[in-house]
Amino acid sequence: MLDKFRALSLSHKTAPVQIRELIALDDQSIHSILLKLKEFFSLQDALILSTCNRTEVYYRHELDLSAEIIKLIGLEKGIVDVVNYSEYFEIFDKDQEAILRLFRVAMGLEAQVVGDIQISNQVKRSYQASADLDMAGPFLHRLMHTVFFTNKRIVQETAFRDGAASLSYAAIELIESLTANTYQPRILLIGVGEIGEDVAKNMVHLPEAKVKITNRTQSKAELIAAEMGFEVVPFQECHQAMQEADVIVSSIRRSEPFITKELISQFEIQSYKLLVDLSVPRSIETSVEEIPGVVLYNVDNITSKATEALEKRLAAIPQVEQIIEETIVEFAGWKKEMMVSPTINKLKQSLEQIRQEELARFLKNASEKEIEVIDKITKSMMQKVLKVPVVQLKAACKRDEAEEMIEFISDLFDLDKIQEEK
């Protein structure tokens, strides 16, 4: 039986956030599970992707290991009844289905925000983790480099990655553009509810920024700050932090404005102060813009940009899918050749072994010149004998009958006893 590329996925489309959080794997857990897959199942190709929206395992094996992998995840996470969560996993048991799934995920077609640029980097990190453990063989290496090449084509040839297509992404993009000339801009994020938390996690795209966060419930701010490496400001010290910040992002729920013109007018503004209001109802008085050096953006300003970008991305989906289809067809050609190459190598080794044995048997008393001529003749004969089965194997690939042909030739030449040379 030949190895097949397979996948299992738990994502925002199949499981609520409570389940996704329970199953999510950190780097250490991924490392541990990869090692167990290598040890227990002798896997040479395996990749684990775990983000806030999905936990997916891609692997190459002759058997469907999805039940075993779910149990390994449960063991790693300390979930005794993990089998009860099996219904949340989607299984991709066919080669082409699993390959297409990886492409769609890596390109951002399956993301909550279509075209999410983060997913591409997350896939690269997952691949690196596999490669570091020698769990990326020739198949996965070729597949992943094909994925990266496809991503490059999509960036260059389509509008699929243009602009920020979510409120939090658009806010980060706005901050990045307006602070481009500021060395290590100081950012204060007020409120880490659903939107605030999303903004905090996307601050990863502002690596030079010095970020502080504050929240009424300090424990939540501390949890996010610990994950992202930010500083926490006690909520009662918020005004002082606002004074020091170049950028204030407000995502706080109140019935009346939290940041007023009167408050901001008390601050000494050296060059500028960018205020971003992500609250509904609004938490920043619109009149703050009357203060010199103050620039205010609200949800409507930012959402219009995000909506426009999302529409462009959605319009580009057919083009993206066409590029993926073309790439997978090319990859399938290579995969078919790869499928038969071990059999071809074994056949060559088998015939070469016979040739060498017969030469040793009959050329004991032959001269150097005679050995040279006979060696050349027998090599030529071997190549001609090889030609027909090799052509037949490659033709069987194109007809999707390679497995049957491999089995037939292996039996005919007793190739199972041959160990393929590395």
Image (spheres, rainbow, N blue to C red):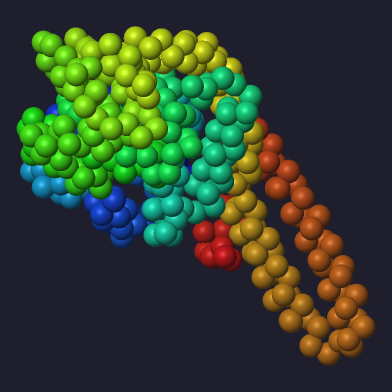
Residue 355 versus residue 183 in the image, above or below:
below
Q: In the image, is 252 to the left or to the right of 33?
A: left
Report x, y in % for residue 207: 39, 44
Report x, y in % for residue 276: 31, 22
Q: Residue at x 65, y 53 (%)?
A: 344
Q: Residue at x 69, y 37 (%)?
A: 395
For this rendering, which residue is in front, 162 or 401?
Answer: 162
Q: In the image, is 394 to the left or to the right of 123?
A: right
For this rendering, which residue is in front, 266 or 287?
Answer: 266
- Residue extending furthest toward the bottom: 365
Residue 228 versus residue 308 in the image, above or below:
below
For this rendering, which residue is in front, 405 or 10?
Answer: 10
Regarding residue 50, the answer to whether it shows in the image is no
Regarding residue 158, the answer to whether it shows in the image is yes
Report x, y in % for residue 319: 58, 17
Q: Quadrant of residue 251?
A: top left
Q: Residue at x 69, y 64 (%)?
A: 351
Residue 157 versus residue 237 in the image, above or below:
above
Q: Residue at x 68, y 60 (%)?
A: 348
For this rendering, which residue is in front, 286 or 137?
Answer: 286
Q: Quadrant of residue 182?
A: top left
Image quadrant where one finds the C terminus: bottom right
Image quadrant where one finds the N terminus: top left
